Image (cartoon, rainbow, N blue to C red):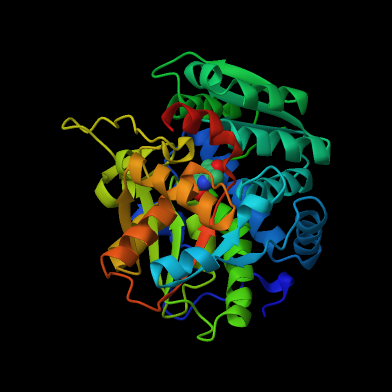
Amino acid sequence: MRDVLTWGEAAPPDGTMGVPGARGRFGAYGGRYAPESLVEACREVGEAFREAWADPGFRGALARLLAVHAGRPTPLTPALRLSDELGVRLCLKREDLTHTGSHKINNVLGQALLAVRMGRRRLIAETGAGQHGVATATAAALLGLEATVFMGERDIERQALNVFRMRMLGAEVIPVTSGSRTLKDATSEAMRAWVGATGDSHYCIGSVVGPDPYPWMVREFQRVIGDEARAQCAAELRTGVPDHVVACVGGGSNAAGTFAGFADTAARLVGVEAEGGAGAARGRLGVLHGCRSLFLQDGDGQITQAHSIAPGLDYPGVGPEHAHLRDLGRARYVTVTDDEAVAAAVRLARTEGILPALESAHALAWVIRAAGDGELPAGSTVLMTLSGRGDKDVSTLKELL
Ligand SMILES: *Cc1c(COP(=O)(O)O)cnc(C)c1O
């Protein structure tokens, strides 16, 4: 088992999922496409992160916060009844059991600790459904920082409970009225707010997207998922490493963190996207929110709106490293429909007593489909990251079922 203080230090032999290349590139993707003042701010964040990540004091402080506040390590649960039904051996990495109910807390605690180290007093964040906003507000409260969260007006209406949660935690929630009044516009607005406040504020991005160093930094903060799972699989599975490693992909942070723990093994990596948000599977090269990656676009190259029943998968693009892993053939990206995800959520609830987030249910839906059509041969071992719990989705499910 790798020591907590050496997470992520070794670049895998094939060169994937290590430190990105010059100017924050993952192959043809990534980079830093931002106004001059933000380029400088990103450079500072990158430098501070590089230093902090090499500092055992920082690593130790983060590991302790993750343990005593967020509830790590999370268990690896063998899904015994469902495995029997499917004819495969499925293990679930339980990010749903973390404080605040999803993997987002791993990244946010890392960035909040970095903000403190950089002498910042405020976190700026964007949020779609509110999950990342709640996690940011939580970390800010814990570390005595202020939090300003930008959220589209439409999302504020749809996610009233999370808005209330953020305000309870002391965060300021700012409605965004431009464009489609959803996540894409909230992100643009948050970046704009950071331009005027780089001296005292840290911009806390919620996935492996945005300008360098965010895709790399967020993956490193999430690789605790993959590193823990690697050690747990070694103990749980006769084969040591699972045949397949599966995770859902919105921007791609829980998948990147999971994949990072297995990039140097023979495990097949599978990212599962929503049919209506399939940036990696169906996107085209473009630039959005500071980075070059794959985005859903119309004939004129305009970025189009994503649609998914799972709010966390409702992003029109994918992080640059996933685009690169796709090109390399190191990871494969597949899609699942809303209906398949809902059916998978119900099935997990009834076979294992776990109600997953609809995002995570996408990953499971692919496992179910692949076990059925023989893509996962009988007896295969599968590690799947269960990125979050389903409590947030009960009203959506209640309308459907
Ligand atoms: C936000 C979210 C996701 C999608 O984000 P990634 O960056 O792709 O991991 C997936 N699952 C849950 C539960 C989420 O809250």
Query: Which residue occupies 77% across, 67% down?
Result: 56
Q: How many marks?
A: 0
Residue 30: percent from left, percent from top:
41, 51
Question: From the viewer's perspective, is 118 left or right of 83?
Answer: right
Query: Which residue occupies 46% across, 58% down?
Result: 247
Residue 372: percent from left, percent from top:
30, 64
Asked whether 69 or 54 is in front, the reply is: 69
Residue 280: percent from left, percent from top:
32, 51
Q: Is residue 319 visible?
A: no
Q: Quadrant of residue 76?
A: bottom right
Residue 314: percent from left, percent from top:
41, 36
Residue 111 drawn above or below residue 22? above
Asked whether 245 or 90 is in front, the reply is: 90
Query: Which residue occupies 59% across, 81% down?
Result: 234
Q: Which residue, as the protein is rendered here, is positioned at the far bottom?
A: 238
Q: Quadrant of residue 198?
A: top right
Q: Quadrant of the C terminus?
A: top left
Question: From the viewer's perspective, is 18 left or right of 288?
Answer: right
Q: Is residue 270 visible?
A: yes
Q: Which residue, as the protein is rendered here, is positioned at the far top?
A: 177
Q: Quadrant of residue 123?
A: top right
Query: Which residue occupies 41% across, 80% down?
Result: 266
Residue 125 drawn above or below residue 367? above
Question: From the viewer's perspective, is 220 left or right of 84?
Answer: right
Q: Quadrant of the N terminus?
A: bottom right
Residue 188 drawn above or below residue 274? above
